[in-house]
Image (cartoon, rainbow, N blue to C red):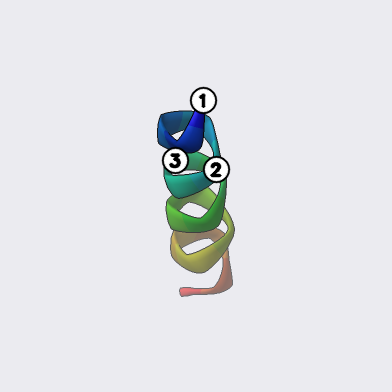
Amino acid sequence: EEYLGFVARLILHVREM
């Protein structure tokens, strides 16, 4: 689902911080 794509991008963004 698109939900998983949103979560995956959110996690990758947070890991960069």
> Looking at the image, do the residues carrying marks 3 and 2 touch, with CB atoms under 8 Å apart?
yes
- Secondary structure beneath dot 3 equals helix
Q: Which residue is mark 1?
A: 1
- Secondary structure beneath dot 1 equals loop
Q: Which residue is mark 2?
A: 5
Q: Is residue 15 placed above or below 3 in the rendered structure?
A: below
Q: Which mark is residue 16?
A: none
Q: Please identify the residue farthest to the front as the structure is shown.
A: 1
Residue in the image at 53% along x and 56% along y: 9
Q: Is residue 8 placed above or below 9 in the rendered structure?
A: above
The amino acid at mark 2 is Gly
> Looking at the image, do the residues carrying marks 3 and 1 touch, with CB atoms under 8 Å apart?
no
- Estimate the x, y position of residue 8 in percent, counting from the top left: 56, 44
The amino acid at mark 1 is Glu
Mark before the other along the chain sequence, 3 or 1: 1
Residue in the image at 46% along x and 74% along y: 17
Q: Is residue 16 placed above or below 15 in the rendered structure?
A: below
Q: Which residue is mark 3?
A: 7
The amino acid at mark 3 is Val
| Total count of labels | 3
In the picture provided, is 15 more to the left or to the right than 10? right
Q: Looking at the image, is mark 2 or mark 1 nearer the viewer?
A: 1
> Looking at the image, do the residues carrying marks 2 and 1 touch, with CB atoms under 8 Å apart?
yes
- Estimate the x, y position of residue 2 in percent, counting from the top left: 47, 37
From the viewer's side, name the closer residue of 8 and 2: 2
